[in-house]
């Protein structure tokens, strides 16, 4: 028997179903009248997972293991490759690993039911041999080299190390050449058996479908179930003192990042969500091209394009970062500090909060048209207890007082880190900061 | 539909989406040495306007307008340049606090394009020009930050034809540095007065309502225009013989191998209809040939892509590899192309490629923003816009079609960007 729950949002003319049936992951079905179907299976394992518990025993996980599993699970015991099988059904498949999650996804115009069954089939039939693991290592080592060569990737990992020196977030998702080299079929199988079961997965689907269509497609499918597994979240450690780090690389102009750890939102999911949205309004005020800071930076020639700003919210590790390119990253840093100080002392005015709230609301609503993007958003937010369709309504409940109280709590000019990658050779004629 | 000679309007009615999108494109003649000016011009128009003379005021107004998204593309295709200005915004029912919202957005867009901010001499303000110049110079110089992007640029440099307007996409550093107020003013006049124009709208408003808004807000450019002369593709140039091999050194871990081939036709030429399927078979479709042969079976790389540069008939294949493996990788790619030339394509792969192309086409038409951008470009450059026709073209492509096409494709340049000290392994 399946339990089907409908959640509706008439103001946006949207709805979705939550489908629960024994032996299956919890399923979220987003109906969209499109010719393409999207499905994304989320497994609760990522690069931050370094240990787990089964019964009384704690087991280690090698760095890069979650990502390695993502690569290797497409191999089937009968010698076929699931990507080829999906291709022959007319589906385009992919997968990715983050700090907390591994996702297997596909899109297709036809044979949706068969493709969905194949998706659940290949993630439940692991096949690791010495030969196929050795072959995959070569590919993953190239992927790792590609990331190490990319200045933006280096910058990202460098500031994560400054923020969280003792947390796995600072490490490359793919692992290190050493850790990749130590991965064996036995290790993969042990970790796989612990994490890959129905209770640690969710399935997100969008397309012109009903719950009956999905249940019919998965009729007879049953994934392993286990109740003796405990996922262990690594501790983040104390908030670190502000630091500055400079590296060199193949860049035209210095790349910089200014970052700060944020307190993890607590409370029920709706309150957590409100706090996250308040922070996003603060980020827009501080760093978007409508803000005073960017106007000043642009006028002084310190930035030629708006900086990239994002907030990441993971259990135990939450932070904001602002990055860009500037000949004088230290001056940019100082100006950001001053803007944060001003934000805490003076807050954001009511008119600005109203304008920014409207913009954020509109951005959310605009995203409801994108079936693929919505599937991704559900995959990222639902496990955190956040409903993407509710987000737009939550914005309208934020008051100026509430936004400013959250921002005063989370921001501090004395906790900002600076990370810089300078060009290998001094080829620019502009004055640069002294190192 | 033709509003006037040289001025078109394409309308897509939809009530299914929460967004609407509107774009206006200007196609005008390329001018050698003006690529950077054209790029700077198109971005300048989306920074300030007469009504919002600072970037901050301009940006704040966009936030007021429910975060209306403005995007601009400046493209060179053959002998012509196109500046495409697009606004994507919430459709009327969802922009509840601003009545007549679409008119308000289009009025803002028209103001940005037709009433830009000027200085006392009626020219674009110098400070804004300097800022856009610096932004463009950063873009040009910043290509080196990505080894793959840099390799792509080098292949473009090495395969460029100096006889025609085959100039770099962004222009050059010296071109960008030389841009003046007067040059921008002249290119702006050329864009407004000597172009073919097209408007495209997708949303829930009635066609006549949108046409009325165009007539009202864009009256300045609603004058008859003569068709532009010129070609969509460069003249054919023979590939290098022997193959031109260029090796450059860099730091880091990976080497980047770039292989360039001269194709017999471009997209808009007879025979070019098979190019989407060729791209899909080579690298876009699931388990495409380069992916399965070079990456999965060979273990040579994580990422390998085939990129078609249609207006100068180049096919680039670019991948990141371990230093010293360029010889085996080049041979593996060569085997892939030989198999296609021999007509040896797994029917399942061909079918997957067709499905991929169909999905790509239909997905475009399920986004108002993508639909408008796609239709606008294609109308301006005389290419098909009907998804059924595009799919029919792909369905007509067989292994034999690709074989015949690839038999006329010639290797041209091999470019290797390798870490210092990396040995060449032939």
Image (tube, coloured by chain):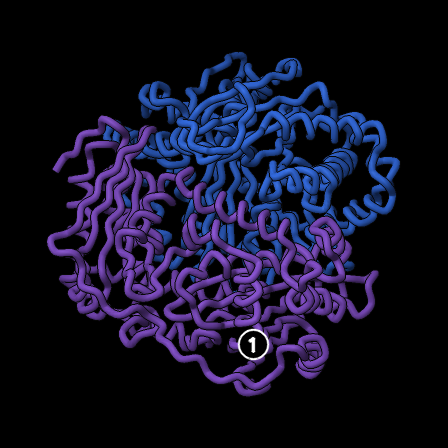
Does the image show residue A49? no
Left or right of B310, for residue B219: right
Q: Colour of chain A?
A: blue
Left or right of B247, for residue B229: right
The image quarter containing residue A24 is: top right
The image quarter containing residue A144 is: top left
At mark 1, the secondary structure is: helix
Q: Position of residue B414 (x, y in %)?
A: 21, 47
Q: Residues within 10 Å of mark 1 (few under 14, many from 20)?
A: some
| Above/below status of B384 relative to A238 | below
Q: Which residue is mark 1?
A: B193
Give the chain letter at badge 1.
Answer: B
Left or right of A257, for residue A92: left
- Residue in the image at 69% along x and 67% along y: B115
- Residue in the image at 35% along x and 56% along y: B285
Give whichever of A252, B271 is nearer the camera: A252
- Residue in the image at 77% along x and 47% along y: A356
Q: Position of residue A150 (x, y in %)?
A: 42, 33
Q: Colour of chain B?
A: purple
């Amino acid at each position: 028997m399946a339990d089907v729950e409908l959640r509706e949002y008439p103001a946006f003319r949207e709805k979705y179903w939550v489908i629960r049936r024994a032996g299956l992951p919890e399923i979220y079905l987003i109906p969209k009248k499109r010719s393409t179907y999207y499905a994304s299976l989320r497994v609760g394992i990522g690069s931050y997972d370094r240990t787990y518990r089964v019964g009384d025993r704690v087991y280690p996980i090698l760095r890069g293991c979650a990502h390695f599993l993502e690569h290797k699970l497409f191999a089937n015991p009968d010698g076929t490759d699931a990507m080829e099988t999906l291709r022959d059904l007319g589906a385009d498949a992919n997968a990715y690993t983050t700090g907390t999650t591994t996702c297997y996804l596909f899109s297709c115009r036809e044979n949706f039911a068969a493709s969905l069954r194949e998706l659940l089939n290949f993630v439940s039939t692991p096949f690791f041999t010495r030969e196929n693991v050795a072959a995959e290592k070569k590919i993953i080592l190239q992927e790792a080299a590609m990331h190490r060569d990319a200045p933006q990737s280096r910058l990202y990992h460098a500031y994560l190390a400054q923020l969280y020196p003792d947390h796995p977030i600072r490490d490359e998702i793919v692992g290190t050449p050493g850790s990749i080299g130590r991965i064996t079929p036995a290790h993969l199988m042990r970790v796989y058996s612990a994490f890959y079961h129905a209770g640690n997965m969710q399935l997100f689907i969008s397309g012109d479908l009903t719950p009956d269509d999905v249940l019919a497609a998965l009729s007879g499918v049953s994934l392993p179930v286990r109740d003796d597994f405990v996922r262990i979240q690594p501790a983040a450690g104390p908030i670190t003192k502000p630091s500055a780090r400079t590296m060199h690389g193949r860049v035209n102009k210095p790349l910089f990042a200014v970052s700060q750890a944020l307190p993890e939102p607590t409370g029920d999911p709706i309150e957590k969500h409100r706090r996250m949205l308040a922070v996003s309004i603060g980020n827009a005020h501080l760093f978007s091209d409508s803000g005073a800071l960017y106007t000043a930076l642009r006028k002084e020639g310190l930035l030629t394009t708006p900086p990239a700003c994002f907030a990441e919210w993971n259990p135990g590790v939450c932070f904001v970062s602002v990055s860009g390119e500037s000949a004088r990253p230290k001056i940019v840093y100082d100006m950001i500090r001053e803007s944060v100080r001003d934000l805490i002392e003076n807050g954001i005015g009511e008119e600005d909060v109203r304008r920014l709230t409207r913009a954020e609301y509109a951005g959310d609503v605009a995203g409801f048209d994108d079936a693929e993007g919505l599937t991704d958003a559900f995959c990222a937010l639902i496990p955190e207890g956040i409903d993407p369709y509710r987000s737009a309504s939550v914005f309208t409940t934020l008051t100026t007082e509430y936004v400013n109280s959250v921002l005063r709590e989370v921001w501090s000019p004395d906790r900002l880190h600076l990370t810089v990658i300078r060009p290998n050779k001094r080829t620019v004629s502009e004055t640069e900061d002294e190192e | 539909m033709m509003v006037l000679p040289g001025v078109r309007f394409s309308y897509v009615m939809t009530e299914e989406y929460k967004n609407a999108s509107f774009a206006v494109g200007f196609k005008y003649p390329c001018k050698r040495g003006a690529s950077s000016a054209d790029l700077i011009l198109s971005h300048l128009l989306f920074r300030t306007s007469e009504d919002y003379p600072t970037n901050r005021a301009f940006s704040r107004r966009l936030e007021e307008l429910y975060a209306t998204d403005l995007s601009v593309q400046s493209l060179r295709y053959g002998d012509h340049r196109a500046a495409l200005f697009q606004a994507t915004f919430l459709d009327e029912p969802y922009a509840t606090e601003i009545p007549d919202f679409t008119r308000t957005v289009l009025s803002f867009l028209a103001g940005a394009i037709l009433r830009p901010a000027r200085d006392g001499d009626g020219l674009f303000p110098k400070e804004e020009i300097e800022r856009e110049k610096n932004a463009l110079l950063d873009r040009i110089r910043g290509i080196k930050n990505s080894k793959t992007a840099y390799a792509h640029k080098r292949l473009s440099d090495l395969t460029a034809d100096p006889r025609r307007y085959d100039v770099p996409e962004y222009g050059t550093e010296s071109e960008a540095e030389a841009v003046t107020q007067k040059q921008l003013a002249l290119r702006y006049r050329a864009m407004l007065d000597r172009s073919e124009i097209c408007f495209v709208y997708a949303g829930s408003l009635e066609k006549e309502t949108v046409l009325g808004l165009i007539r009202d807000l864009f009256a300045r450019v609603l004058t008859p225009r003569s068709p532009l002369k010129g070609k969509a593709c460069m003249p054919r140039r023979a590939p290098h013989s022997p193959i031109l091999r260029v090796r450059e050194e860099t730091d880091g871990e990976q080497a980047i191998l770039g292989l360039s081939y001269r194709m017999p036709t471009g997209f808009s030429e007879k025979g070019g209809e098979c190019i989407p399927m060729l791209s899909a078979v080579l690298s876009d479709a699931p388990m495409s040939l380069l992916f399965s042969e070079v990456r999965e079976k060979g273990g040579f790389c994580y990422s390998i892509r085939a990129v078609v540069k249609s207006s100068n008939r180049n096919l680039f294949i670019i991948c990141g590899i371990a230093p010293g493996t360029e010889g085996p990788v080049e041979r593996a790619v060569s085997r892939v192309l030989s198999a296609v030339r021999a007509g040896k394509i797994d029917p399942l792969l061909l079918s997957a490629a067709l499905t991929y192309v169909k999905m790509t086409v239909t997905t475009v038409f399920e986004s108002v923003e993508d639909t408008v951008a796609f239709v606008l470009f294609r109308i301006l450059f005389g290419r098909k816009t009907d998804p059924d026709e595009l799919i029919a073209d792909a369905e007509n492509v067989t292994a034999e079609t690709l074989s015949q096409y690839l038999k006329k494709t010639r290797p041209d340049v091999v470019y290797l960007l390798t870490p210092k000290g990396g040995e060449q392994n032939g």
